[in-house]
Amino acid sequence: MIDLKVLSATFGAIFFAELADKTQLVGVGMSAKSGEPVAVLIGSVLAYTLVTVISVLLGALLGKFIRPELIRYTGATLFILVGALMFIGKI
């Protein structure tokens, strides 16, 4: 049975995290430039699906060997590091 609380929390977190994200801007740009919104939609959905499958499988695998807190803190640290590097123009 699917836990609706986990499902809705995941939906909300992903929805708001991705809203107006750079990937959304890429979709807008590709759709405007190509004039093929259906092809852009299908390509986007397939890409998001693949990335999500990889992320979920990797998380499930890592969760068996590493404490979830360590995964969360490592991810947050990497996120901040990449942001700082982008801010100073190194990426």
Image (spheres, helix red, strand yellow):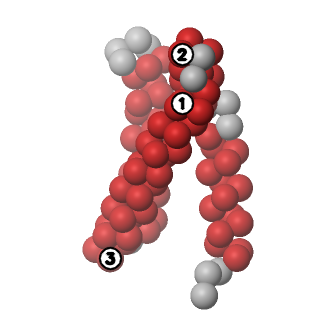
Q: Camera-side residue: 24 or 32? A: 32
For marks 1 and 3, give the one nearer the viewer: 1
Residue 1, given in percent of the width and then of the height, sits at 60, 88
Residue drawn at the location 41% of the way across and 30% of the way down = 82
Residue count near mark 2 (Cα–Cα under 10 Å), binned few <14, some 14–19, many ≥20: few
Amino acid type, mark 1: Val
For marks 3 and 2, give the one nearer the viewer: 2
Residue 49, given in percent of the width and then of the height, sits at 47, 51
The quadrant of the rendering that contains the C terminus is top left
Q: Is residue 75 above or below residue 68?
A: above
Amino acid type, mark 3: Lys
Residue 60, given in percent of the width and then of the height, sits at 38, 70
Q: Camera-side residue: 64 or 67? A: 64
Quadrant of res 33: top right
Q: Name the element at disc 1.
A: helix
Residue drawn at the location 40% of the way across and 51% of the way down = 50
Residue drawn at the location 59% of the way across and 17% of the way down = 35
Q: In the drawing, what numbered circle is on residue 64?
A: 3
Q: Is residue 32 above or below residue 12?
A: above
Q: Camera-side residue: 8 or 81? A: 8
Kindly identify which residue carries mark 2.
Answer: 34
Q: Name the element at disc 2.
A: helix
Amino acid type, mark 2: Ser
State whether residue 48 appears in this view: yes
Q: Name the element at disc 3.
A: helix
Q: Are marks 2 and 1 in contact (CB under 8 Å)?
A: yes
Q: Are marks 1 and 3 in contact (CB under 8 Å)?
A: no
Residue 10, given in percent of the width and then of the height, sits at 63, 61
Disc 2 from disc 1: Cα separation:
8 Å
Q: In the drawing, what numbered circle is on residue 40?
A: 1
Disc 3 from disc 2: Cα separation:
43 Å
Residue drawn at the location 47% of the way across and 37% of the way down = 43
